[in-house]
Amino acid sequence: MMQKQSDDEHTKIEDDWGNPPSPDTPENRKKAIKAQIILGIVCLIGILLPGIMYWLKGN
């Protein structure tokens, strides 16, 4: 059986969000921009690849 959590336990769980964010330093900003560019390229390939394959199959 599941036990109901008390309000105090519930607030402890909500307040526990893990590690704080990294400080905003030039090094961390460069890493974030690099990660965003990589994610953008991967997403662009994921969007364009099915369309290109469909276009090639149609010809």
Image (cartoon, helix red, strand yellow):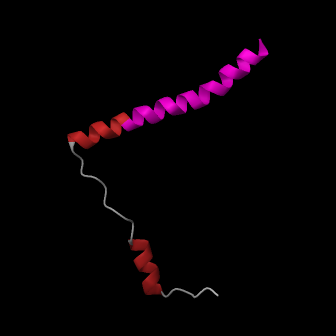
Q: Quadrant of the C terminus?
A: top right
Left or right: residue 5 compared with residue 21? right
Residue 17 occupies quadrant: bottom left
Q: Position of residue 14 (x, y in %)?
A: 43, 73
Q: Is residue 53 above or below residue 7?
A: above
Which residue is drawn at the image coordinates 23% and 40% (left, top)? 27
- Image quadrant assignment for residue 54: top right
Q: How many marks?
A: 0
Q: Main secondary structure of the magenta part?
A: helix
Instruction: Specify the quadrant that holds the N terminus.
Output: bottom right
Question: In the rendering, at what x and y percent does residue 21 appear?
Answer: 31, 55
Above or below residue 16? Residue 2 is below
Q: Residue at x 49, y 88 (%)?
A: 6
> Which residue appears farthest toward the front when viewing the image?
1
Q: Is residue 48 left or right of residue 31?
A: right
Q: Farthest residue in the top direction?
A: 59
| Residue for point 26% across, 43% down | 28
**For residue 19, above or below residue 56:** below
Q: What x and y, as percent, mark residue 8?
A: 42, 86
Judge whether residue 3 is colored magenta: no
Q: Is residue 13 left or right of residue 19?
A: right
- Queried whether the magenta region covers residue 37, the answer comes back as yes
- Residue shown at 67% from the left, 24% from the top: 51
Residue 7 or 52: which is nearer the viewer?
52
Q: Which residues, given as a range, are shown in magenta?
A: 35-59
